[in-house]
Amino acid sequence: MRNAEKHRNSIGSLPQRFAAPNHLTVSGFLTLSAWWRRVPGRQRKSAVEQALRMTSLQDRAGSKVGHLSGGMLCRLGSPSSW
């Protein structure tokens, strides 16, 4: 347990039925997520672009969350995208 603090930020969880607001675009959801995570306003755009790259959802940035496949939805909700 000595290394617990070191690894705490690298651990996350994703519910089996991850639910994001279907009316938001992928980019809009990531922007909202960045706000929730207190990413400073000046850095949000680049944080969203980085998350899109990390999840391979760049081509879906303008798509509604409700139109994503199950796998895409899992990538969108992945804690590792932040």
Image (spheres, helix red, strand yellow):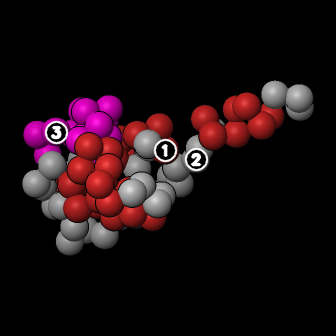
Magenta span: 48-60
Task: Assess whether mark 2 and mark 1 are in contact (beta carbons under 8 angstroms).
Answer: yes
* Mark 1 or mark 2: whose residue is earlier in sequence: 2
> Label 2 sits on what residue type?
Ser
Dot 2 alpha-carbon crowd within 10 angstroms: few under 14, some 14 to 19, many 20 or more:
few
- Locate residue 68 relative to residue 14 in the image: left or right: left
Label 1 packing within 10 angstroms: few (<14), some (14-19), many (20+): some
Q: CA distance from mark 2 to mark 3?
A: 23 Å
Q: Residue furthest right?
A: 1
Total labels: the figure holds 3
Task: Say if 3 sits above or below 25 in the image.
Answer: above
Do we see residue 63 in this rendering?
yes
Which label's residue is closer to the chain start, 3 or 1? Answer: 3
Q: Which residue is mark 1?
A: 79
Pick whichever of labels 2 and 3 is earlier in the sequence.
2
Which residue was labeled with disc 3?
58
